[in-house]
Amino acid sequence: MTVGERIQALWARTEPLRLRWANTEAGAHRHLETADSPSRTQRILVFSGLTGVAVGLIVVVLDKAAHDWLADPMARQPLWLQAAGPAIGLLVAWAALGALTDKATPDTTDEYVRGFHHSPSEPPDPNPAVGRAVAGVGTIGYGGALSLEGPAVYVGSVVGAWVQTRFSRFFSREDARALLVAGAAAGMSAVFKAPATGALFAIEVPYQSDVARRVALPAIIGAAASYVTAALVDDLTPLLPLNSEYSSFGAWELVGAVVVGLLCGAAARGFSLGLVLLHGRAARIPSLARLAVAGVALFGLAYLADALFDTPLTIGPGYDVVTWVGDPTRSLWLILALLLMRGLATSATATGGGVGGYFVPLAVAGALLGRLAGEVMSFDDTNLFLVVGMAAFIGAGLRTPLAAVLFAAEATGQPGFVVPALVATAAGQLVIGRASVSRAQREGRLGHLERRFDLPISAVLETDVRTVPPDATVEEFLAVHLLATRRRAVPVVDHDNRYRGVALLDELAAVPRDAWATTTVGNVAHGDAPRGMTTWLIRDAVQTMQAEGTDLLPIVDGEDRFVGVVTTGDILRLDEILEKTTKA
């Protein structure tokens, strides 16, 4: 054997050692890339900043399109055209959602909340993003009584989720929502020029009484990067500037803040519950009919507002309402009338198919209610309660108290109002209950088993199931089907795959022996036995099985065709599998 051949043989013998070393090195590298790894954290923050820059640029374009290119020119038109503007916006939204999406819903902020809860398995679908953005610009630009933060938050979350999916190799399971939240925070920050509000809103809005974990830093970086980007291409004037010399407060002002908070909390609860009721009833009406009714209502409200206030204050998000109500000469009855009319305008825009957010409409309602309370309590500086009301109404309506307080300070340029606003917002949380304008929020973070319950029922569906036809005899069932299935309950399915009920062993066995050959399963099967739908979650199946005291639940589709069964054993096995997968 030559020297070269000996070297090759020796090298081949070292292959197991080299493989072990490579695996050890890879393991060490993975160990360094744990949840607490500095390099991992730096990568997340870098991507969060880049996401914030991209979202900031997109939101600036959306903001200019809605306000500079549409809303400002519309404000210079004759009254009849301004009053017709909201209906035009609803028509634009309807057309955009129909033509640019697969008939997506008008939801925006709620889509971010759903994406947060379903991520990473079901992040926000990017396909409807352009359609929803166009629909939002049309709704708000033509005078719908919603605000642009909804489309901004949604588009930001879609951008963040796309970036994270595109560069998934740089992220672990613990980072599943990092850029989703960073993008949402960036959208909120850019549209309101309020970075602290954007960061807190993104981590508060998914839950009613909790906050998102492990995403605070991405949210802060994304919001800051977006704010700086918007500042470079736009001005930084506060959205709702107020002229006030107020810089201190005493005990009576804090008492007044509590009163305002309680009023705003109660009003926000009524508005939220009413909105849910309207959405439920409007869903039964064809979309064009809803659009027509809402358009007529908004047209009439604009004319009525112009007659009462010399300007159609029911049009648009309501920034001009805050300036109007800041005038100390306004009549209490006019303020109350505008509060009711703004609530109707926002409800009509939302149920008519408009696309937008509720943040500014809630702030406007709080400003009006706070001003009313300040006048009734005879305080000198009514602007204090105007700002306090804004924070309390937003905090209660959207269940985002911290973001609401900071918005009141950032948007008005009055940081001295933070403490009274915080007191009022806390009072509002006492009376809001479980109401919220967001239909996708959850009460709090789910536990280990609760997270499993929110999976679709297909995760535990057993489709390869033996069934028994209704014309089979009891004798055939006991001799053939029972031995084949080894179950005490068997679904009864006819030849057209229609579900007919459940055959129970105990009841079939109770049939007299001499009647087995003549009694069919269909005669003694439980036709009213519980069944589940393919659209259910595991939670729905568990609740039904528990209520009926059964371990087997047949599942049918929308036409009552049998699809499969779910058993408690399948659910328990799924939990074990997912637990092992999560630990791995």
Image (spheres, rainbow, N blue to C red):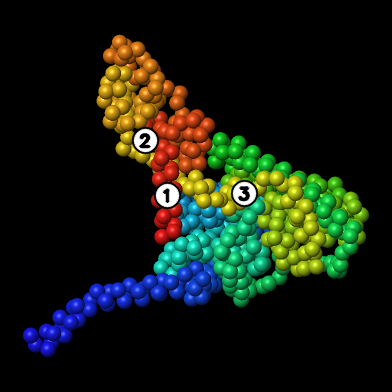
- As drawn, is 348 to the left or to the right of 447? right
Residue at label 3? Answer: 443
Residue sitting at x 42%, y 22% = 526
Residue 530, horizontal then vertical, whole percent: 46, 29
- 330 or 6: nearer the eye? 6
Query: The disc labelled 3 sits on which kind of residue?
Result: Glu
Which numbered disc, 3 or 2, marks the residue that appears first in the sequence?
A: 3
- 178 or 166: nearer the eye? 178
Residue 242, horizontal then vertical, whole percent: 79, 65
Q: Which mark is residue 563?
A: 2
| Distance of label 1 from label 2 (alpha carbons) | 24 Å
Query: The disc labelled 2 sits on which kind of residue?
Result: Val
Crowding around mark 3 (Cα neighbors within 10 Å: few <14, some 14 to 19, many 20+) is few
Which numbered disc, 1 or 2, marks the residue that appears first in the sequence?
A: 2
User: Is residue 311 something one can see in this rendering?
Assistant: no
Locate residue 514: give its quadrant: top left
